[in-house]
Image (cartoon, rainbow, N blue to C red):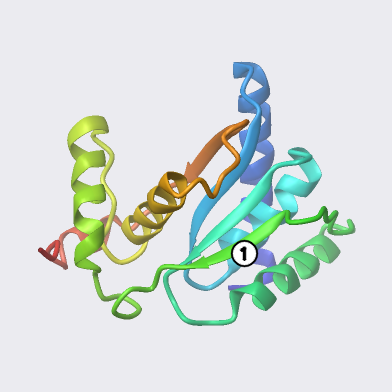
Amino acid sequence: STALGAVGYVSGAREIAVQAMAAGVRLGHIVSATGSGGTAAGLLLGAGLFLPGAKVTGVAVDTDHFQDIVPRLAEEAAALLERTLPREKDDFRMVDHVGPGYAVPNPEDTPYIEELARTEGILLDPVYTGKAFAGMMRLLRQGYFDGQDDLLFVHTGGAAALFAIDLPR
């Protein structure tokens, strides 16, 4: 991940803000998988610029120190845009959901992945977006999000892994 790469998700956050406003949706939380830090960094900066009050939660699918990496990348991306990184209390949180290891599916995630595919037709890979979605759903059921604003899960791809790795049981 690089600051320049994070800028793409800053633009994505702006588009999310425009669409949310048009739909009358107040986003309180944005959740994404975090495997290198760039997506979360761009979302953190973009939320600060375009979605005041929205919190970004990264679901770590690797063991790097994302609590430090993400804000640093966001600050570097802000510098590229000649902006400053607006920060609010608790605007960024990392949660660990690596499971048995990076790029190793977690059998506990399989029911979440299958349910989303069956009910919504949305496919998640078992090592990145699937882990992040399952981690988010566990947090949701634990009351981690305040329940007062809408929650957005950012699906970042991973379709190739769908054909390379079987869902563990």
Residue 156 visible in image: no
The amino acid pointed to by label 1 is Gly
Vertical placement of 5 versus 55: above or below?
A: below
Picture quadrant of residue 169? bottom left
In the image, 146 versus 14, the foreground residue is 146
- Residue at figure coordinates x 26%, y 58% from the top left: 109
**Disc 1 designates what residue?**
5
Residue drawn at x 78%, y 70% is 76
Does residue 83 appear anywhere in the picture? Answer: yes
Mark 1 Cα-neighbour bin, 10 Å: few <14, some 14–19, many ≥20? some
Image height of 119 relative to 53, above or below: above
Reply above or below: 144 against 122. below
Does 126 sit left or right of 72 as displayed?
A: left
Image x and y of residue 28, in percent: 65, 38
Where's residue 162, x and y in %? 20, 58
Quadrant, the N terminus = bottom right
| In this picture, residue 36 sits left or right of residue 111 | right
Which residue is situated farthest in the front direction here?
142
